Structures are given as C-alpha cells and as structure tokens.
Image (cartoon, grey):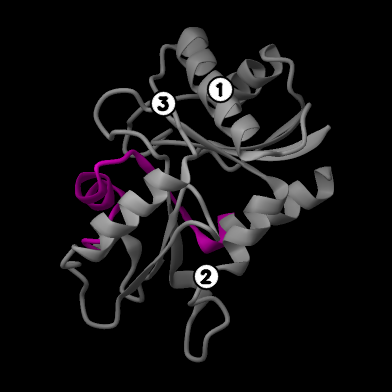
Amino acid sequence: MSTFVALVRAVNVGGHAPLAMADLRRSLEGLGLSNVRTYLQSGNVVFDAGGDGHADAAAGLATAIAARAERDSGARVGARVLSADEMARVAAASPFAGAPGVDERWLHATFVLGTAAEGDLRATTADADSRAYEAAYARLKLPAAPGERAAFVGAPTLAPPVVYLYLPHGYGRSKLSNAYFERSLGSAATTRNWRTVRALVELSKEHG
C-alpha cells in the first residue's frame, strides 16, 4: 500500500462545485481506497491505495476520483493525485519558502493538472506536457504587482508542474489567480496556500 494526496479542483470555492467532504470521503472509499481523511473543506484528501506510488498510478487514481465524484454527487471536478513522496518534493522545491524576508503566510502553490481548463478535467502526468507548459509559462508577461513573485517548476523535478507564488498583498488581491494560470497555460489547475501544502505533507507522512 502507498499513501497519496488528492487535490480536487474548484471545490467549495465561491459557490462553485459544492461538495461536502463527507461525500467526497465516501466516494473515495467507494473506489476501495482506505484510511481516507480530508483536510479543510476545499478538496484535500489523504488516502492509502495499492501500488508503488508511481506517476501512472497517481494519474489513474485522479481519473477515477473525478469520475466517481461526478457519478456520486454530480459535481464535475478535476483532481491531481500525488504520492506522499511527490507531495514532500512539492514542499521542498519552492524557491521562496525559507528565503530571507519571505513570510510564508503569503506563499501559494498552483498545481497544473495537465488537462484543458475547458473540457475534460481529468489529469495526466506526461513529462512532455510539463515541458509544453514550461514553454507557455516562459512566454507569459505576468501581471504581477510590485513585490509579487512567481516561479515555474516542472519536469524532471515535478510533473505535472507547479507554479509557486509569493503574494505579499494577499491572494485575493492578486491577478496571479488560479483562473489566470488556467487561461494562460491552457490547463486546469488548482491552488493551495502554503499552510495547506505543509499540512498535507505531514498528514501523508502520518499515513505512510
């Protein structure tokens, strides 16, 4: 058995895709997943599943979770699934966390799901896709306010990639939103603050 983290896209945000976490837990348990736990109300789940935590297994789990949630609740969501080790790498790969003068309250991570933002929201994990998103990111003229910073980390370190954000004026005031990156990269994405990232790393360690 391996421990995984599922990040479910756009759940209980601004009234979009309302989905009770108890219902989401039941959906994952219905897939035969065990030790299912949720964190907060925004689609964060830690669970155990068979397999070795390989990226192909994570992609298959993401597809199954999205399909089961839609079947059970009617909520059309996307998901990204990471092994416990991958989640730890996400936390370790931030170029901002721990840097001088950086207040971690203003850190966020935007997880690229690797699918079109409009259309099928189920995740893939191809390195080629990560390189394509990296090229698209490099062409962007980010609408960053003074003091805001963003960094793309993709394959081979992380695939699908993550955009790390430092937003000292607050996420709600920034133009570097989840919707902005979905439009600009042509992929569904889901964003978490750094406290959530850290918490999911710790929860997945407990399961492991």
Above or below, 145 relative to 81: below
Is residue 117 depicted above or below 110 in this figure?
above
Q: Tell me, yes or no, if residue 2 can be seen here.
A: yes
Disc 1 target residue: 65
Say whether residue 65 is left or right of residue 186.
right
Task: Name the residue located 53 percent from the left edge and 63 percent from the top edge.
Answer: 194
Binning the other alpha carbons within 10 Å of mark 1 as few (below 14), some (14 to 19) or many (20 upward) gives many
Front residue of 120/159: it is: 159
Disc 1 marks which amino acid? Ile
Viewer-nearest residue: 133 or 3? 133
Which element carries disc 3, helix, strand or loop?
A: loop
Residue interval drawn in magenta: 174-196
Give above or below for 37 relative to 90: above
Q: Residue at left 21%, top 71%?
A: 144
Name the mark on residue 5.
none
Task: Identify the amino acid type marked 2.
Answer: Ser
> Disc 2 marks which residue?
94
Where does the image place residue 127, in percent across and percent down from the top left? Answer: 46, 47
Residue 12 in the image: x percent, y percent? Answer: 42, 34
- Report helix, strand or loop for mark 2: loop
Residue under numbered circle 3: 77
The residue positioned farthest toward the front in the image shown: 128
Q: Residue at x 43, y 71 (%)?
A: 106
Question: Which of the two discs, 3 and 2, labels the residue nearer the N terminus?
Answer: 3
Q: Was residue 182 drawn as part of the magenta stretch in this picture? A: yes
